[in-house]
């Protein structure tokens, strides 16, 4: 599972950062939750809430060959 800062929302066709998603009200977050995908491979993404040990991020089980899982890309994955 690879952590990401940005995902694509299928509802409105826009990219959303973890910070933006975290600051949404509960109703809007619930509406978007099942419509978030990796910006590179399109696999379903899930939100990981902020806690004492981590910042808010997204996670996904990426398709084989997804550019976000390549070693050269991994250094830049949070800059998406």
Image (cartoon, grey):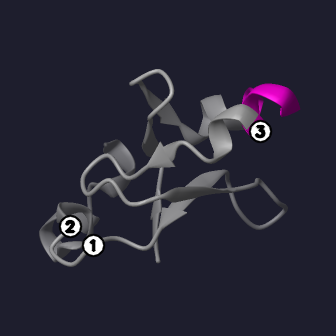
Q: Do the residues labelled 1 and 2 touch (CB within 8 Å)?
A: yes
Residue drawn at (47%, 58%) of the image: 44
For the residue pair 43 and 16, the one nearer the viewer reads as: 43
Decide if residue 15 is on the left or right side of residue 72.
Answer: right
Q: Callout 3 environment at 10 Å: few (<14), some (14 to 19), or many (20+)?
A: few
Residue 69: x and y, percent?
A: 26, 72
- The residues tagged by marks 3 and 1 sit, at their Cα atoms, a distance apart of 25 Å
Residue drawn at (75%, 26%) of the image: 28
| Part of the protein shown in magenta | 23-30
Is 27 one of the magenta-colored residues? Answer: yes
Query: Magenta part mainly helix, strand or loop?
Result: helix
Residue drawn at (44%, 43%) of the image: 7
- Pick whichever of labels 3 and 1 is earlier in the sequence: 3
Count of labels shown?
3
- The residues tagged by marks 2 and 3 sit, at their Cα atoms, a distance apart of 27 Å
Provide the residue designation for mark 3: 30
Provide the residue designation for mark 2: 66
Q: Do the residues labelled 2 and 3 touch (CB within 8 Å)?
A: no
- The residues tagged by marks 1 and 2 sit, at their Cα atoms, a distance apart of 6 Å
Residue 5: x and y, percent?
A: 48, 48
For mark 3, give the secondary structure.
helix
| In this rendering, the label closer to the viewer, 1 or 2 | 1
Provide the residue designation for mark 1: 63
């Amino acid at each position: 599972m690879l952590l990401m800062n940005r995902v694509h929302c299928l509802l409105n066709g826009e990219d959303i950062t973890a910070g933006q998603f975290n600051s949404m009200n509960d109703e809007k977050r619930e509406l978007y939750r099942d419509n978030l995908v990796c910006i590179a491979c399109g696999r379903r993404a899930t939100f990981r809430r902020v806690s004492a040990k981590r910042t808010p991020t997204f996670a996904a089980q990426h398709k084989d060959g997804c550019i976000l899982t390549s070693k050269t890309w991994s250094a830049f994955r949070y800059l998406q």
